[in-house]
Amino acid sequence: MFICRILLLDSCIGLAIDHCYGSKCTPLTSYHFWPKNEAWEQIRLEVESKPWITTGEKIKILNKTSEIFNYWQKGELQLSGSNYDFKIQIDNSGVQLAGHL
């Protein structure tokens, strides 16, 4: 399973991907911030460099990354306050808030 870790800031969104197995998660990518840089492209390069991730999983990760950026751009990921860190599970049911960290 893969988890998106999201950091919401006033002017940008930070996103990192973790690989989870059992109750343990390890970072798959570092945080990348959008729109300050080409975060989607940077995440794509990191994910594509992992030969053990299937093509289908890579596509799912990148599609959900795009979805998250689009939600943020439309204002659908705003929370009250300034800095929030939460995770979103990447699965077939869409982008879902998995809980605050």
Image (spheres, grey):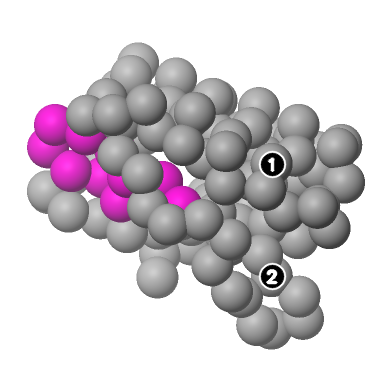
Magenta segment, which residues?
Answer: 6-16
Q: Which amino acid does the dot numbered 1 rest on?
A: Glu
Q: Is residue 14 above or below residue 22?
A: above
The residue under the point 37% across, 52% down is 31
Classify mark 1: helix, strand or loop. Answer: helix
Does the residue at mark 1 contact the one at mark 2 (Cβ under 8 Å)? no
Amino acid on which disc 2 is placed: Cys
Q: Position of residue 27 (x, y in %)?
A: 54, 67
Q: Which residue is mark 1?
A: 48
Whether residue 93 is visible here, answered yes or no, is no
Q: Is residue 12 visible?
A: yes
Give residue 26's position: percent from left, percent from top: 59, 74
Question: Mark 1 Cα within 10 Å, few/some/many (few <14, many 20+)?
Answer: some
- Looking at the rendered image, the disc whose residue lies closer to the viewer, 1 or 2, is 1
At x 32%, y 59%, the residue is: 85
On the image, which quarter does residue 76 sit in? Answer: top left
Q: Give the main secondary structure of the magenta stretch.
A: strand
Q: Pick the quarter of the image with the N terminus.
A: bottom right
Picture disc at residue 20 = 2
Separation of marks 1 and 2 at Cα, in angstroms = 18 Å
User: Closer to the camera, 88 or 58?
Assistant: 58
Query: Could you say which disc has been placed on residue 95 in the image?
Result: none
- Residue 65: give x, y in percent of width and height: 55, 34
Would you place residue 26 above or below residue 37 in this image?
Answer: below
Does residue 72 appear to the left or right of 25 in the view shown? left
Q: Which residue is drawn at the image coordinates 33% and 19% (left, top)?
A: 73
